[in-house]
Image (cartoon, helix red, strand yellow):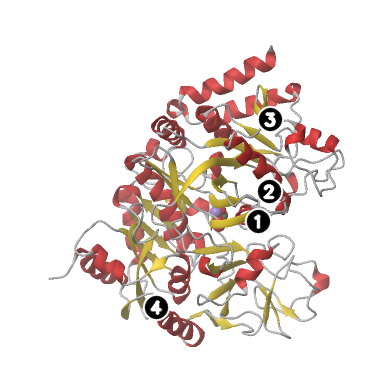
Amino acid sequence: MSTALEKWVEEQAKLTEPDKIYWCDGSEEEARGLIEIGMKEEKIGDTPIFTQLNQKNWPNAYFHRSHPTDVARTEHLTFVCHPDKETAGPNNNWMHPDEAKAKMTKLSDGCMHGKTMYVLPYMMGHPNSPYAKACVQLTDVSYVAVSMRIMTRMSKTVIEKIGNSENFVKGLHSVGDFDPDKRFIMHFPDENFVWSIGSGYGGNALLGKKCFSLRIASWQGLKEDWLAEHMVIMGIEDPKGNITYIAAALPSACGKTNLAMMQAALPGYKIWTIGDDIAWMNIGPDGRLWAINPEQGFFGVASGTSLKTNPNMIRTLKNNRFYPTLFTNTAINTDTNEPWWEGLDGEVPKNMIDWQGKKWDSSSGNKAAHPNARFTASIYNCDMLSKEYDNPKGVPISAIIVGGRRNQLIPLVVESFDWQHGVYLAASMGSETTAAATGLKAGVRRDPMAMLPFCGYNMGKYFQHWLNIGKKLSNPPKIFSVNWFRTDEEGKFIWPGFGDNIRVLKWIIDRVNNKVQAKETPIGLIPYLGDICLEGLDVPKERLQKLLEVKLDDWSEEISGVEKFLSQFGRYIPNEIIDENKKLAKEINE
Ligand code: OXD
Ligand code: MN
């Protein structure tokens, strides 16, 4: 008698028609074998899936070049298939589940001809954690199988754990023929199922990550009373050895990974990393919010990563404890066979091939690495990994930070008055878009909780869920907004950022521990100047004053921008959130 899992795999194989089915066990030996297959047998066009990099300088490192049209998440091809459009909300593309399945069935018919179907059993979260979820993904490319070994806890014990139950999260993935016109990432939240075709890119193809751990999991969290969030988790150790755990939501390109692995610039302070992208947060028996990182690796942007911006990541990438580390769409120094990207330390190598495999001409003005070139590395290779990472209970969160990239207006740090006001700060957060980067009029792209592309249901309802969770916490974390990106009259950043952000985190934990007072303003609680430690830093008090300035005259445009943004969620938006915006408008006009 076959199990529910075996039957499901058989059905998918009947549709996709692979030559072989291979059940992965997640072992290192197996990963070595898959890399061999990727170097010798599997190809994209004429390019092997993997090539080996310089093993002396980058131990266990391999290079992968993607299909040139397949270099990033494709939000316009990503659908959340609830039975009705309103449940998906204006924040998602929607297709009826029947229509989506008919479309995907047609595209998947025989799509694994001549290929191996890899069956990947994995856990998101520690297998002993009450918050972890058992999952199985099917894929037809070694790159995805190996990446999933790095990013998740892949093991054959998951198959035993699932047993004959139907209660596992399913993912069906095929790279198809990489045709962007036949590329879709479909989510079926009511069935715990993700179906993806036509892309091998991380966010589209490693289905445990954004697809399951955020889009599907946010829907599970709504039904089961927990939160699936796009947040880092970190511990901050003070000079006395006390560790305070925080979670932080920052949209892409705001230095989230750098924050999670920060080299603290204040003597005696030390950061312990738990996660750099996703947090699952549950209400603990003690009425506090407890967070786990469901992932086991980093899938980070290589470009800009250096000893200056993130020395701990460079060390992680050169560490060889856990096999292997992958580099995708970087350039390659052909003299040394090392990966290279814009922003990496040292001189620009003389002889390189670019991310597409062509000889790079430094005078062409083209980037050698793709701006979204990535590395995939195990979290166990990170020397600052918290010893609580594998704790099945997770860590208790004392502060939640939300932020964006704002040149003006938003102070360096603001503490919310209470949970509801904190949810309002999160609902209104955003980043400036520059006309140059987007071709659009410069403005603020709102991205509440950095979840706009990842919330698997109507975001108005999501805000309500946050308010409800707050009511159930007897000891909720404090909520803060941060902005490292305020600029002066010449457009230069005022705040040094990176390791110096510890100065802001110190104030946050001082507030959590009731060590300092704060100044009340209509937008929230602001630090008194003397309470942000500037020791050893070349930032005079006047500049700090500028960073903390709240000029009420400047706020009316912001308030109307927030009102406009929230109005798209119609009747789903909680009155409490609208009221917070109205309250602020009233205070400003007084
Ligand atoms: C990511 C993202 O890749 O947020 O983590 O886009
Ligand atoms: Mn992310």
The image quadrant where one finds ligand 2 is bottom right
Label 4: which secondary element: loop
- Whether the residues at callouts 2 and 1 have beta carbons within 8 Å, the answer is yes
State the CA–CA distance, disc 4 to disc 1. 31 Å
Label 1: which secondary element: loop
Instruction: Judge the density around disc 3: few (<14), some (14-19), many (≥20) Cα neighbours within 10 Å.
Output: many
State the CA–CA distance, disc 2 to disc 3. 17 Å
Q: Residue 215: x percent and y percent? A: 43, 49
- Whether the residues at callouts 2 and 3 have beta carbons within 8 Å, the answer is no
Query: Upstream in the sequence, badge 2 or badge 1?
Result: 1
Instruction: Judge the density around disc 2: few (<14), some (14-19), many (≥20) Cα neighbours within 10 Å.
Output: many
User: Which quadrant is the C terminus positioned in?
Assistant: top right
Location of mark 3 (residue): 526
- Whether the residues at callouts 1 and 3 have beta carbons within 8 Å, the answer is no
Query: Upstream in the sequence, badge 4 or badge 1?
Result: 4
Query: Upstream in the sequence, badge 3 or badge 4?
Result: 4
Q: Residue 547: x percent and y percent? A: 77, 36
Which residue appears at 62% of the width and 58% of the height?
A: 261
Left or right placement of residue 30 versus residue 170 in this view: right
Location of mark 1 (residue): 262
In the image, farthest residue toward the front: 240
Which residue appears at 60% of the width and 47% of the height?
A: 251
Instruction: Judge the density around disc 4: few (<14), some (14-19), many (≥20) Cα neighbours within 10 Å.
Output: some
Q: Which amino acid does label 3 sit on?
A: Ile
